[in-house]
Image (tube, rainbow, N blue to C red):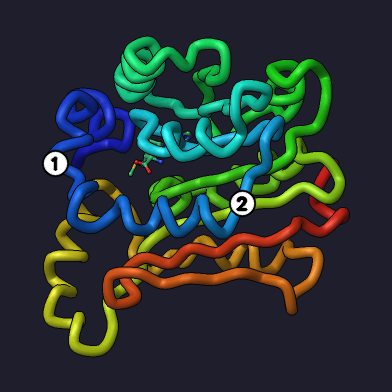
């Protein structure tokens, strides 16, 4: 059996081309960033950042005075992310943290943000891969300032006429080690400050779900 670390180890250099980014998954991350709506000067944690495919959108949103902190446990995915940061000139804005989200110490994120709580957490196609997703979520939310926001983008089985693509979606999830039935955006629906103000979008026949909301003070720092 391929362990998650091996899956995102050897495969890291091929991830951007083989993950279906262009035709499928980019649409979800773009919708998610739009719903999260980070502001200039914000600090956003990208949980399970992988090779950094969210960085362009997040850096554009937070601007030169903001910060993006990418967290991932795969050294190979982080190596690709590091190259992306260098090639794009984002080294002043993007910091990488090598950590297992399931045991992440929230103070590491606070330290990376000058001791302050971060403004938002964003996670795309990662929580469905992390078996200890509840624990990972609890830990990252503990680094968010009161009134901060969160966004989750992940996968479910396609619906309607798109159901014909379900075998392909299942194959993509199996290849990436994702649980297509995990529906991790439910963590955010549970922990939103106001259930009436949860923003949601679906893309690609419902296969991609993006949810964003302000977090409840019960889960922030
Ligand atoms: C499908 S990739 C998604 C990467 C990126 N967020 C994206 O949208 O392209 C899942 C990522 O989660 C990371 N990951 C898996 N388990 C993890 C854990 N326990 N802690 C931190 N990262 C983890 C993997 O290393 C991988 O980079």
Residue 168 place in picture, x, y as percent: 13, 65
**Residue in front for this viewpoint, 183 or 23:** 23
Residue 132 place in picture, x, y as percent: 53, 47
Q: Is residue 101 left or right of residue 181?
A: right
Toward the bottom, the furthest residue is 160
**In terms of secondary structure, where does tag 1 sit?**
helix
x 15%, y 37%: residue: 17
Image vertical order of residue 153 relative to residue 9, above or below: below
Task: Tell me the quarter of the image containing the C terminus.
Answer: top right
Residue 159, image quadrant = bottom left
x 63%, y 25%: residue: 67
Residue 166 place in picture, x, y as percent: 18, 74
Q: Which mark is residue 3?
A: none
Task: Tell me the quarter of the image containing the N terminus.
Answer: top left
Q: Is residue 102 visible?
A: no
Q: Residues within 10 Å of mark 1 (few under 14, many from 20)?
A: few
Q: Which mark is residue 37?
A: 2
Question: In terms of sequence position, does the residue under pointer 2 or pointer 1 come before the other?
Answer: 1
**Residue in front for this viewpoint, 21 or 154:** 21
**In terms of secondary structure, where does tag 2 sit?**
loop
**Residue in front for this viewpoint, 124 or 219:** 124
Q: Is residue 149 left or right of residue 49?
A: right
Query: Which quarter of the frame holds ligand 1?
Result: top left
Image vertical order of residue 155 relative to residue 55, above or below: below
Residue 71 place in picture, x, y as percent: 52, 28
Q: How many marks?
A: 2
Mark 2 touching mark 1, by CB under 8 A? Answer: no
Residue 113, image quadrant = top right
Q: Residue beneath label 1, please?
A: 18
Q: Residues within 10 Å of mark 2 (few under 14, many from 20)?
A: some
x 74%, y 78%: residue: 196
Image vertical order of residue 212 relative to residue 159, above or below: above
């Amino acid at each position: 059996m391929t362990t998650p670390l091996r899956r995102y180890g050897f495969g890291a250099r091929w991830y951007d081309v083989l993950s279906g980014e262009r035709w499928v998954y980019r649409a979800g991350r773009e919708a998610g960033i739009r719903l999260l709506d980070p502001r200039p000067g914000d600090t956003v944690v990208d949980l399970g950042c992988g090779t950094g495919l969210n960085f362009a959108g997040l850096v554009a949103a937070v601007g030169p005075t903001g910060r993006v902190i990418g967290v991932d446990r795969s050294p190979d995915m982080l190596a690709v992310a590091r190259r992306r940061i260098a090639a794009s000139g984002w080294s002043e804005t993007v910091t990488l943290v090598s950590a297992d989200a399931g045991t992440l110490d929230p103070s590491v994120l606070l330290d990376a943000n000058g001791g302050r709580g971060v403004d938002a957490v964003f996670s795309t196609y990662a929580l469905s891969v992390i078996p200890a997703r509840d624990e990972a979520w609890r830990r990252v939310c503990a680094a968010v300032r009161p009134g901060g926001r969160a966004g989750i983008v992940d996968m479910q089985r396609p619906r309607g006429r798109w159901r014909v693509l379900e075998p392909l979606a299942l194959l993509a999830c199996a290849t990436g080690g994702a649980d297509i039935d995990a529906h991790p955006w439910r963590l955010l629906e549970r922990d939103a400050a106001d259930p009436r103000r949860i923003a949601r979008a679906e893309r690609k026949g419902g296969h991609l779900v993006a949810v964003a909301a302000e977090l409840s003070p019960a889960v922030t720092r």
